[in-house]
Image (cartoon, rainbow, N blue to C red):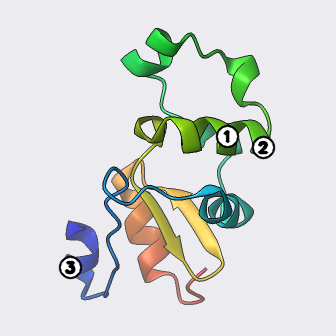
Amino acid sequence: MRIAEELGVSAEIVLYLKTPPDAATLGDIIDKLEDPVTDLVRRDGLWAKLGVTEVDVTTRDQVISLLVKHKQLLQRPVVVRGRTAIIGRPKDRVRDLLTSPAGG
């Protein structure tokens, strides 16, 4: 992640298509997430093709189930630092998290 490099912060990059998060990992991210859980799901062509609707992603369990089955729908980047996780859009949010004194 370029922002981490610019800030001199070490980061572990997880390529979610090669190493998709399992249900437990997604649950851990959700527990730390500052954003609404439904924001972890991308609304794109695959969303439409699968016929997914907002009703299908209103709860933690629904989001986990959908993302385990369809890893491509995971919104990215997801940045986790300490006890805080965010969706890194816009990019300034990543910079803010990585430079926060408490580290989340």
Tell whether 80 sits left or right of 31: left
Residue 44 percent across, percent down from the top left:
41, 21
C-alpha separation, residue under disc 1 versus residue under disc 2 = 6 Å
Q: Amino acid at mark 3?
A: Glu
Quarter-of-image position of residue 99: bottom left
Label annotation for residue 5: 3
Q: Amino acid at mark 1?
A: Ser
Residue 18 versus residue 41: which sits nearer the camera?
Answer: 18
| Mark earlier in primary sequence (1, 3) | 3
Q: Residue at x 51, y 58 (%)?
A: 21
Label annotation for residue 61: 2
| Residue bearing the label numbered 1 | 65
Q: Residue at x 48, y 24 (%)?
A: 43
Structural crowding at the residue carrying mark 1, measured as other residues with C-alpha within 10 Å and reported as few (<14), some (14–19) or many (≥20):
some
Residue 48 percent across, percent down from the top left:
48, 11
Residue 95 versus residue 74: which sits nearer the camera?
Answer: 74
Query: Which of pointers 1 and 3 indicates the residue nearer the eye?
Result: 1
Q: Is residue 14 above or below residue 30?
A: below
Tell whether 56 sits left or right of 43: right
* Residues marked 1 and 2 touching at CB (< 8 Å): yes
Structural crowding at the residue carrying mark 2, measured as other residues with C-alpha within 10 Å and reported as few (<14), some (14–19) or many (≥20):
some
Q: Amino acid at mark 2?
A: Asp
C-alpha separation, residue under disc 1 versus residue under disc 3 = 33 Å
